[in-house]
Amino acid sequence: MNLSKDLLYVYRVLFTGIHVLQTGEIESNLGHLNEHFHLPDIDDLIIRKTAEGAPLAAEEFEKHRTRIEELFTGLDSAFENSALPERAANFSALNDFVIRIRKDMGGF
């Protein structure tokens, strides 16, 4: 198991969620997102991930766990303060589009 890779997935999801709620823009590139969040350990995690299994010490993991908890709080706050509508104005058309694409790809 590559814990660095798992942590990067969690950071990407949380960063993306907060970013879209704050800006209305989808960005999933972790490097670009971290330009906003400025977490110094992200680059280290990326290096560890590419090193395939470079272990994290217990205190390092605890630091990430604490940060992730803070980001979940930030995600909740971003949701509460978001100017995005609860539902897209063209929800029906968007839903039809997603269903059509999934059918075309054999997803249904």
Image: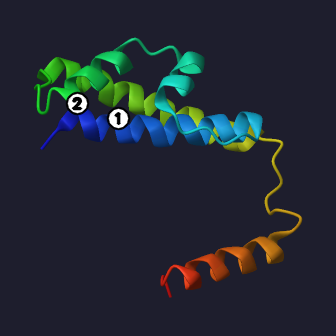
Q: Are marks 2 and 1 in contact (CB under 8 Å)?
A: yes
Q: Is residue 92 above or below residue 72?
A: below
Splitting the image into 4 quarters, where does residue 63 fall?
top left
Q: Classify mark 1: helix, strand or loop.
A: helix
Q: Residue furthest right?
A: 89
- Residue 21, image x and y in percent? 70, 41
Distance from disc 2 to disc 1, alpha carbons, whole Å, reads 9 Å
- Residue 32, image x and y in percent? 55, 24
Residue at image x 48%, y 84%?
106
Q: Residues within 10 Å of mark 2 (few under 14, many from 20)?
A: some
Residue at image x 23%, y 30%?
49
Tell me: 27 left or right of 85: left
Tell me: 92 left or right of 40: right
Q: Residues within 10 Å of mark 1 (few under 14, many from 20)?
A: some
Q: Amino acid at mark 1?
A: Leu
Tell me: 83 left or right of 32: right
- Residue 89, image x and y in percent? 89, 64
Q: Is residue 62 above or below residue 94?
A: above
In front: 46, or 105? 105
Residue at image x 37%, y 41%?
9
Q: Which residue is mark 1?
A: 8
Q: Which residue is mark 2?
A: 49
The residue mark sitting in front, 2 or 1, is 2
Splitting the image into 4 quarters, where does residue 75 fall?
top right
The N terminus, quarter of image? top left
Q: Amino acid at mark 2?
A: Lys
